[in-house]
Image (tube, grey):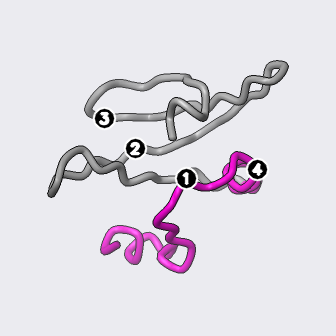
Amino acid sequence: QGSLVTAGISDRFVSLAIPFETLTSELDAGRVVPFRMQMGPASFHFVVVVGYERMGDTESVTVLDPLFGNAVMPYPTFM
């Protein structure tokens, strides 16, 4: 959480998946949403969600990922 404290957002740290509506509320308020993803037993990776869209029943997010590249993907796939 050190980087989150530095950015002044440690009070909103959540350790579980968040509902799509919570994510969109943050993005609509002009805040990007960082995610820490566990890659292995002691290996973590950070990405940032910067946008979203709804097309019919499909909810998608725009993810900036420095390791695997940026992508737009369905939210359930991302989570």
Q: Earlier in the sequence, mark 3 or mark 4?
A: 4
Residue 58 is a magenta residue: no
Q: Residue 47 carries which label?
A: 2
Task: Report how far apart the C-alphas of labels 3 and 1 lie in the structure.
Answer: 15 Å
Task: Single out the mark in the foreground, 4 or 2.
Answer: 4
- 79 or 11: nearer the viewer: 79
Residues rendered magenta in the picture: 1-29
Q: Which residue is under mark 4?
A: 21
Q: Compared with residue 3, is residue 31 higher up or lower down, i.e. above or below?
A: above
Is residue 55 rendered to the left or right of residue 33? right
Q: Which residue is under mark 3?
A: 66
Q: Which amino acid does label 2 sit on?
A: Val
Q: Position of residue 13 (x, y in %)?
A: 50, 71
Looking at the rendered structure, the secondary structure element under dot 2 is strand
Q: Residue 33 carries which label?
A: 1
| Residue at image location 64% in from the left, 36% down from the top | 51
Disc 2 + disc 3, Cβ < 8 Å: yes
Is residue 51 rendered to the left or right of residue 15? right
- 13 or 2: nearer the viewer: 13
Q: Where is residue 36 in the image (x, y as percent from the top left)?
A: 37, 54
Disc 3 + disc 1, Cβ < 8 Å: no
| Residue at image location 70% in from the left, 46% down from the top | 20
Task: Single out the mark in the foreground, 3 or 4.
Answer: 4
Q: Which amino acid does label 3 sit on?
A: Pro
Is residue 20 rendered to the left or right of residue 64? right
- 61 or 30: nearer the viewer: 61
